[in-house]
Amino acid sequence: MIHIESLLYTGSISGTINLWDLDTLQMIRSVKAHQADVLSLAGIGGFAFSGSARGYLKKWDLTSNYYGIKLIVAAGLSARINGRRMLG
Protein backbone atom coordinates (compact mmCIF):
# COMPACT_ATOMS: atom_id res chain seq x y z
CA MET A 1 0.00 0.00 0.00
CA ILE A 2 0.99 3.57 -0.64
CA HIS A 3 -0.68 6.41 1.26
CA ILE A 4 -0.29 9.95 -0.10
CA GLU A 5 -2.47 12.69 1.40
CA SER A 6 -6.09 11.55 0.88
CA LEU A 7 -5.18 8.84 -1.67
CA LEU A 8 -4.45 5.17 -1.06
CA TYR A 9 -2.93 2.87 -3.68
CA THR A 10 -3.38 -0.89 -3.22
CA GLY A 11 -2.30 -3.95 -5.18
CA SER A 12 -4.55 -6.97 -5.66
CA ILE A 13 -4.52 -10.66 -6.53
CA SER A 14 -6.29 -9.80 -9.80
CA GLY A 15 -3.16 -7.97 -11.02
CA THR A 16 -4.63 -4.51 -10.55
CA ILE A 17 -3.48 -1.40 -8.74
CA ASN A 18 -6.45 0.38 -7.21
CA LEU A 19 -6.61 4.06 -6.29
CA TRP A 20 -8.90 5.00 -3.39
CA ASP A 21 -10.12 8.40 -2.20
CA LEU A 22 -9.95 8.23 1.59
CA ASP A 23 -12.24 11.25 2.00
CA THR A 24 -15.13 9.55 0.20
CA LEU A 25 -14.01 5.93 0.78
CA GLN A 26 -14.57 5.27 -2.93
CA MET A 27 -12.32 3.57 -5.47
CA ILE A 28 -11.64 6.15 -8.17
CA ARG A 29 -9.41 4.15 -10.52
CA SER A 30 -8.35 0.58 -11.19
CA VAL A 31 -5.42 -0.17 -13.50
CA LYS A 32 -4.58 -3.62 -14.87
CA ALA A 33 -0.93 -3.51 -13.86
CA HIS A 34 0.20 -7.14 -14.17
CA GLN A 35 -0.93 -10.50 -15.54
CA ALA A 36 -0.41 -12.05 -12.09
CA ASP A 37 -0.97 -11.07 -8.45
CA VAL A 38 0.53 -7.73 -7.36
CA LEU A 39 2.71 -8.84 -4.45
CA SER A 40 4.51 -5.60 -3.71
CA LEU A 41 3.84 -1.89 -4.06
CA ALA A 42 6.23 0.82 -2.89
CA GLY A 43 6.29 4.57 -3.30
CA ILE A 44 9.42 6.70 -3.68
CA GLY A 45 9.07 10.39 -4.43
CA GLY A 46 6.44 10.78 -7.13
CA PHE A 47 6.85 7.21 -8.34
CA ALA A 48 5.48 3.79 -7.47
CA PHE A 49 7.03 0.40 -8.15
CA SER A 50 4.87 -2.70 -8.41
CA GLY A 51 6.06 -6.29 -8.40
CA SER A 52 4.08 -9.31 -9.57
CA ALA A 53 3.99 -13.01 -8.74
CA ARG A 54 5.49 -13.72 -12.18
CA GLY A 55 8.58 -11.70 -11.28
CA TYR A 56 7.92 -8.49 -13.20
CA LEU A 57 8.65 -4.98 -11.96
CA LYS A 58 6.92 -1.84 -13.26
CA LYS A 59 7.49 1.85 -12.55
CA TRP A 60 4.52 4.22 -12.31
CA ASP A 61 4.20 8.02 -12.30
CA LEU A 62 1.97 9.13 -9.42
CA THR A 63 2.18 12.83 -10.30
CA SER A 64 0.32 12.59 -13.61
CA ASN A 65 -3.07 14.17 -14.04
CA TYR A 66 -4.43 10.82 -15.24
CA TYR A 67 -6.28 10.00 -12.02
CA GLY A 68 -3.06 9.69 -10.07
CA ILE A 69 -1.29 6.80 -11.80
CA LYS A 70 0.28 6.32 -15.22
CA LEU A 71 2.73 3.68 -16.44
CA ILE A 72 6.01 5.21 -17.50
CA VAL A 73 6.80 3.83 -20.93
CA ALA A 74 10.55 3.44 -21.36
CA ALA A 75 12.99 0.64 -22.03
CA GLY A 76 13.77 -1.57 -19.08
CA LEU A 77 10.85 -0.61 -16.84
CA SER A 78 9.11 -3.94 -17.20
CA ALA A 79 11.80 -6.49 -16.42
CA ARG A 80 12.13 -10.05 -15.15
CA ILE A 81 13.55 -10.24 -11.66
CA ASN A 82 14.42 -13.11 -9.28
CA GLY A 83 17.71 -13.77 -11.07
CA ARG A 84 16.09 -14.21 -14.46
CA ARG A 85 16.25 -11.71 -17.32
CA MET A 86 16.69 -7.95 -16.98
CA LEU A 87 15.87 -5.55 -19.79
CA GLY A 88 18.11 -2.55 -20.04
Image (cartoon, rainbow, N blue to C red):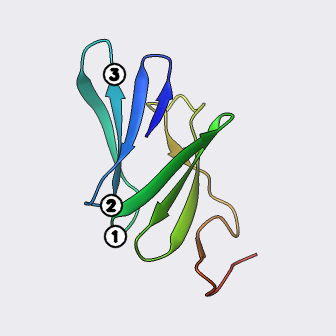
Residue at (64, 86) in percent of width and height: 85
Q: Which residue is mark 2?
A: 15
Seen at 43% across and 30% down, the residue is 67
Q: Which residue is tagged 1?
A: 36
Question: Where in the figure is residue 27, as x and y percent of width and height?
Answer: 26, 30
- The spot of residue 39 in percent (x, y) is 41, 60
**Quick one: 22 or 28, which is closer to the camera?**
22
Classed neighbour count for the residue bearing mark 2: other residues with Cα under 10 Å, few (<14), some (14–19), many (≥20): many
CB contact under 8 Å: marks 3 and 2: no
The disc label shown at residue 10, or none: none
- Amino acid beneath label 1: Ala
Write down the residue under mark 3: 21
Judged from the image, the secondary structure of the residue bearing numbered disc 1 is loop
Residue 55 position within the rendered picture, expressed as x and y whole percent measured from the top left: 50, 75
Q: Nearer the viewer, residue 31 or 44?
A: 44
Q: Residue at x 33, y 60 (%)?
A: 15
